[in-house]
Image (tube, rainbow, N blue to C red):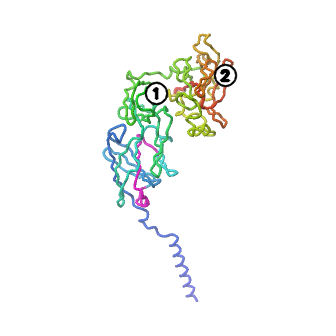
Amino acid sequence: MKKVLLYLCLAVGLLSCANEIDVNPVEDETSAGVPMTFNLTVSDGPATKVAKTAWAENDVIYVFFKGLGEKYLKLTYNGSSWDNASGGGTLLDTDFVDLSDKTLTAVYFPVAVDVTYASDKFSFTRGGKPVYNYYLYQTGAEYTLEGTTVSASLTLGKPEGFVQFHVSGIQDDVAGYTFGCTLVQPVACAAVATGGTVSESVLQAGARLSGVADSDGAVFGGRLTTSGSADYTFTLANDEKIYTLTRTGKTLEAGKMYNFPALSAADWSMQNASDLYVDLGLTSGLKWATCNLGATTEADYGNHFAWGELTPKSIYALTPYFDNPSGNGITFIKYATNKKRVLEPEDDAAYAALGGQFRMPTDAEWTELMTICTWTWKTTSDGYASDGYLVTGTNGNTIFLPAAGYRSGADLYYVGSYGFYWSSSIYENDSPCARSVHFNNVGAGRSFYGRDAGYSVRPVSRPVSD
């Protein structure tokens, strides 16, 4: 009987061991995969790198294999050849087993970027935002796979419509400058999908560009919206100065880079930012510009702008309107209820035109101006070039707000008798409106109106020294 019990215990023990082996099999060391090796050549020359004729040390190209998520290849130029390293995890031979389409997408950025993977795409940011300068790319490039070696030849090219501008002598402080031209649109390479498609993030034409330093200056780039002969005005601004370069009848062509003279050259006109604003002694320390945007004197009406748009136009309506891409006058995307409440710099007409610390005032800042300052209605009979309000600050300094009317459709209304000025604040309710200030000879007050109307813009500035 004891022997029988012993045999039974042995049998149970064997069964237990068998079950443990089935549930937790010993992993085959070869099933984890073998690291891949890469034999990738990158063509050189002007057709490949926009700003130079050769790659520079520490330039980086990101390579994404169609159908493969999370992992990618990072090529870094060491001055003579390209070193490679895996990103998002080690690239293994097992990663390529199910990739029937042997193609890849390669992207180059002129600055270091952060690469993140989510929702079947790789996204690129710097400081949490897309890189609005230029990029180079290639999609659908074929590669061969032999054992654990991937081989391919890369020839990156310029995105369609891109143009670049090189300004000499500002490489040491390029981070302090922004570049603006109403006919150049900032574009960023935003993402590469696992299917190999490149997607862009696009701002309004005229939004300011940040530069990329090179050995003798800085490069600014974006998409040209109008090719051929035209009158171009370029601005380069920092917190202290605004430089303007005008080219009449200039022919700009996409795919090219244009060299501008150094800022000290006679070609550029220069204004001190401090000459464009007035200290009214406000509690906030905010400075108000002496003129409306687009005006050259305080009594000039200047231009009219739809809220959030960067340039004046002939027809003011919700179709078309920059935040209403569907064209139905109802669906808003960027500045919709419970989303963004104040204009971002790329949609601020004052910042686009002047750069530096200039921007549109918020609703609260208009309120401060009306509360603290003295408003006195003035007319042409008082010796002013136009009717409007003389605003006197606590320190005795003044600005003049002309009654420039407003635009709707193709028409101008109430010019000379009413002033309509935008704030940068959206209206609180669920409506296509933004906060504004309306005034006539009786008084001034806060209001709101449809964002598609053409109102005046009076810039403000809060210099870094404040």
Splitting the image into 4 quarters, where does residue 16 fall? Answer: bottom right
**Residue 171 visible in this rendered orientation of the protein:** no
Q: Bounds of the magenta span? A: 90-114
Quadrant where the N terminus sits is: bottom right
| Image mark count | 2
Residue at (43%, 21%) from the top-left corner? 269
- Mark 2–mark 1 contact, CB under 8 Å? no
What residue did someone put label 2 on? 444
**Other-residue count near label 2 (Cα within 10 Å), few / some / many at <14 / 14–19 / ≥20:** some
Callout 2: SS: strand
Look at the image and say whether residue 372 sits in the magenta stretch.
Answer: no
Amino acid at dot 1 = Ala
Q: Looking at the picture, how far across and down is residue 193, in whole percent?
A: 47, 50
Residue at (66%, 28%) from the top-left corner? 447
Residue in the foreground of this view, choosing between 250 and 184:
250
Splitting the image into 4 quarters, where does residue 256 fall? Answer: top left
Splitting the image into 4 quarters, where does residue 49 fall? Answer: top left
Q: Looking at the picture, how far across and down is residue 327, in whole percent?
A: 57, 38
What residue did someone put label 1 on? 237
**Residue 159 visible in this rendered orientation of the protein:** yes
Is 402 positioned to the left or the right of 176 in the image?
right
Quadrant where the C terminus sits is: top right
Q: Looking at the picture, how far across and down is residue 277, in whole percent?
A: 54, 21
Position of residue 209 relative to residue 197, above or below, is above
- Of mark 2 and mark 1, the one earlier in the sequence is 1
Q: In 3D space, how far apart are the residues under numbered discs 2 and 1 (Cα atoms)?
A: 33 Å
